Image (cartoon, helix red, strand yellow):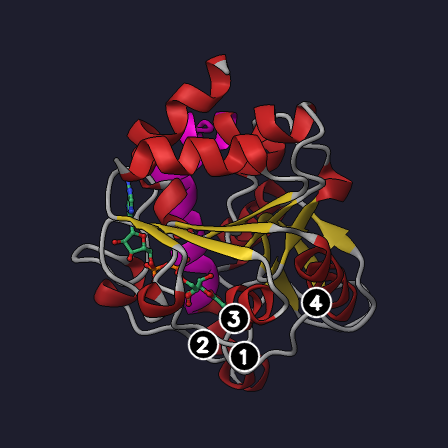
Amino acid sequence: TGRRRLLALIEGARAVLPFTGAGISTECGIPDFRSPGGVWTKNAPIDFRDFVARRAMRDEAWRRRFALEEQFGAAQPGRGHHALASLWRAGRAPAVVTQNIDNLHQASGVAAQDVVELHGNTTYALCLSCAARYEIAWVRERFDATGHAPDCACGGHIKTATVSFGQAMPEAEMRRAEELTLRCDLFLAIGSSLVVWPAAGFPLLAKRNGARLVILNREPTEFDEIADLVVHADIGDVLAPLVSH
Ligand code: OAD
């Protein structure tokens, strides 16, 4: 079966590169973006340029962020995260490249420097001008006290450390993801619809560079046709056996 072949491919690979999307975190209670009940299915995303231009947008973005904290603030890593952490710990995967912003790869034990976050991290905030770091709880206290999202002492706007539509991709992470992609011989795309660019370019690059491409996702994706193996199944179910391996 597909699952057996996937485990065999992992077994035989020199360097596995896991590349994850929101699907790996749904079993942790965090919704993905494009499924029914997904984040973008409910609210249209706030564009970065609107965030910068309008205080009402910043307030709205922060209200949404606080609502997430109530729903998912206590989310714990799932079976997929633990499986990838064990691959990393065993030295079979040098790093995990992720589009996720939920910090769950780090929480599952992968060292922070080996989690390559293409879309940033929502568990803390940064000043857009001076890059000072702020904790979400601090922003919330200020918001509750004043009714508005606070600005930094330098006057810059404070935003979760995520990459919004309209915002530049992080350069160092893009470079690292490219290097890792070019060095792997097995690229595992896990739980992503693979429709968001430039992130979706990495599975393509891996394939072009001669690596095997495996796609593990409940639904079909853009790149199923070019993949060496497609497994349409639940991520936790498929990856759980890796932990005991
Ligand atoms: P999507 O919501 O687009 O895709 C998640 C995929 O995971 C879907 O195809 C689901 O079918 C699948 N899925 C969900 N739960 C699963 C499970 N338990 N087992 C197997 N498959 C499952 O999320 P992403 O591809 O991560 O960017 O979205 C990419 C980017 O779009 C995000 O990083 C975010 C969003 O806009 C930014 O915010 C910049």
Label 4 or label 1, whichever comes before in sequence order? 1
Q: Nearer the viewer, mark 3 or mark 4?
A: 3
**Dot 4 corresponds to which residue?**
174
Tell me the quarter of the picture where residue 7 sits: top left
**Measured Cα–Cα span from mark 2 to mark 4:** 31 Å
Q: Which residue is drawn at 58% across and 23% down?
A: 86
| Residue 115 is covered by the magenta coloring | no
Total count of labels: 4
Label 3 or label 4, whichever comes before in sequence order? 4
**Three-letter amino acid code at disc 3?**
Leu
**Dot 1 corresponds to which residue?**
48
Label 3 or label 2, whichever comes before in sequence order? 2
Query: Which percent across, then down, holds residue 11?
Result: 54, 30
Which residue occupies the foreground of this view, 28 or 52?
Answer: 28
Q: Nearer the viewer, mark 2 or mark 4?
A: 4
**Three-letter amino acid code at disc 2?**
Ala
Query: Which percent across, then down, holds residue 87?
Result: 60, 29
Provide the secondary structure element on which disc 4 rests: helix
Residue 20 makes an appearance in the image: yes
Residue 67 makes an appearance in the image: no
Which residue occupies the foreground of this view, 8 or 32?
Answer: 8
Query: Which percent across, then down, holds residue 13?
Result: 60, 39
Label 1 or label 2, whichever comes before in sequence order? 1
The segment highlighted magenta reads 60-82
**Measured Cα–Cα span from mark 4 to mark 1:** 19 Å
**Dot 3 corresponds to which residue?**
204
Instruction: Indicate left or right for 127 with 37 as reference.
Output: right
Tell me the quarter of the picture where residue 41 sits: bottom left
